[in-house]
Each structure stands twice: as C-alpha cells, then as structure tokens.
Image (tube, rainbow, N blue to C red):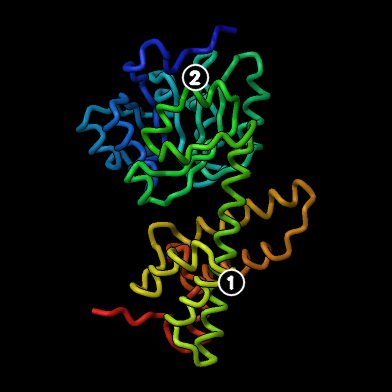
Amino acid sequence: MSSPTPVLDPAHVDTRPTVGFIGLGNMGSGMTRNLQAAGFPLVVTDLRRESAAELIAGGAQWAQTPREVAAASDLVITMLPTPKHVEAVASGPDGLVAGLPDGGTWIDMSTSVPEVLDAIRTANADRGLHLLDAPVSGMSVGAANGMLQIFVGGESDDVERLRPVFEAMGDPERILHVGGHGAGYAVKLMINQLWFSHLVATAEVLSVGVAAGVDLGVLRDALIASPANSTFVSRDVLSILDHGDYDEGFAIALACKDLGLSVDLARSVGMPVELSSLVEQIFRRARARYGDRAGEMTPVRLYEEMLGRDLRREVSA
C-alpha cells in the first residue's frame, strides 16, 4: 500500500491540486464554477457533455468516464442525485474507484447514506483510500454563490487538509466537521427532515389561521414574535407568500428521495419516527398530484387547495 497522496501541502499553500468532479447538475455546476474561480484545475464528467461547456471554455478537462476523472485528478468530488447513482459511478471497470490511486481521496458531497462508502471502504481496506462524506445545504443559490454549508464526516486530518477545497465552495464559517465516517450523511438527512417537517407544519398553521379569519401577514408576524418562530416561517416561506414560488430548483422527486433516506436511517438505528413518516407521505401525495418536477415546497399547494385560496401576502408597493 502506498502512502496517501498529499492534496494540499501546508508549505505550498498557493499550489492548487487538480479536482475531479462528477455531477454537473443544479448543485454541481455552481460548485465547479467556484472551484475554477478559486484556481483549482478541473477534470469533469457528467451524463451531458453540454453541461460542462462553460467549464471547458475556462480550462477544465473533459473525461469520458469516472475512472478517467479519478486517474487524472489529485482528488475526486461527486455530487449526484441518489445513493444508487453514487454506487453506479463508483463501481465497475470504468468506475472512479478503479481510477483512484492507492492513498487517493474521494469526497462524496451527495445526499446519500453511509452504506455505499462503507462497502467501498471495506472492499478496498488495503489501499489506504481517504473517503469522506460531505453533503451540503444552501440549495442551488448557495452553490452558485459559494456559500454552501458543508457537513463533513471523516478523519480530522483529512478535513483540515481539504479545507481550502471546501472553502472554495462553501461559507468558511459553516464548514463543519461533524464526526467520523457517515456522520455528514446523517446530519444532512436530519436537517432535511426537520426542514420538510417545518414546511408541512407551517402550511397547516397558516391555512387554519386564514380559514379562521386571521390576516395572513398578521398571523405570520405573530408567529415570528412567538416562541414558535423558525427560519422557515421568518424567511423560507416568503418565496411562496410573496412570489408564488414553490422552489422548482429542487424537484419534489428529490425531496421524497431525501425523506425516504431519513426514514430508512431511523429504521436502521431502531428509532420510531411517526411524524417523519407522515411528513414523507404528505410529500409523496403532493408528488403524485403535481408531478416529479414540481418544486420541493409544493406540498403547501395541497393546503391551499383545501383552503380554497392561495397563501399570498399583500406586499406594499
């Protein structure tokens, strides 16, 4: 087994390693642009080559397979929709694991589950691979602005060694080492679960209050002034109340995927999650009614339909 490949040498802080990046969707496109702007050479691949056109014009190298990405890079990042996609990209003769050198580094920034990387870690125990889970929060806007919150699971030495890479994509104050392998995945799933629960609870409360004759803006102001306030009530719900925007930048099909993963995680650790399971079913009902590509906040529409009106504030000119 060879020694781990240094990714960032503290003695040469201006050296930028080549970053391989797989997955150039809504999140990955913004993340790679910020890596490129920070001076990291890129090797990229995606199902659609056209998604890399801007990066290639800026100097990025295109690779045909995940294996080619890993072989041509100092570290690899994946940003993919589901655990199945992560497993598919990693495995097989053209997979990224086959292209990683012994001692190589792979950071999975997808919202996934520990089992995928655990299986790869076990199967390659003699190769000294450095595998980290580092999912993110902040949606596509945060990815584009380089202000993602990043939750890193892995060895502390690896986290510090890779911090300049994380800081190119995220808010330096919100890059958190949350524990060992798998902790990043778990923290991200729990954050998603709580946010989705806030969404459903807020939709219910606003709909009942309005049905009882309370002005929507007055009701929201009262909630903000109360112990029941949350970031969702004070900020996130405004996209609906002011603009009728249910956040189509993140499809409800992916929200349902995340909810299923969080409930599965609870099941795997033996914790009953009756409320979370109900929230999952409400999201699945909205998905069935409005389609896979509807926005992640579309469950609010279920309550608007029952209320018989849209939840919209009167905004002063």
Q: Is residue 47 visible?
A: no
Q: Farthest residue in the bottom direction?
A: 213
Q: Farthest residue in the right direction?
A: 270
Q: Amino acid at mark 2?
A: Leu
Quadrant including the N terminus: top right
Residue 220 against residue 102 in the figure, above or below: below
Q: Residue at the spot x=45%, y=82% of the render?
A: 218
Residue 298: image x %, image y %? 47, 70
Residue 25: image x %, image y %? 38, 46
Q: Residue at the spot x=56%, y=54% of the render?
A: 192
Residue 72: image x %, image y %? 38, 19
Residue 100, labelled with which disc?
A: 2
Q: Residues within 10 Å of mark 1 (few under 14, many from 20)?
A: some
The residue to which callout 1 is attached is 201
Residue 192 against residue 12 in the figure, above or below: below
Q: Earlier in the sequence, mark 2 or mark 1?
A: 2
Residue 277, labelled with which disc?
A: none
Q: Residue at the spot x=39%, y=46% of the render?
A: 27
**Element type at mark 1:** helix
Residue 144: image x %, image y %? 32, 46
Q: Amino acid at mark 1?
A: Ala
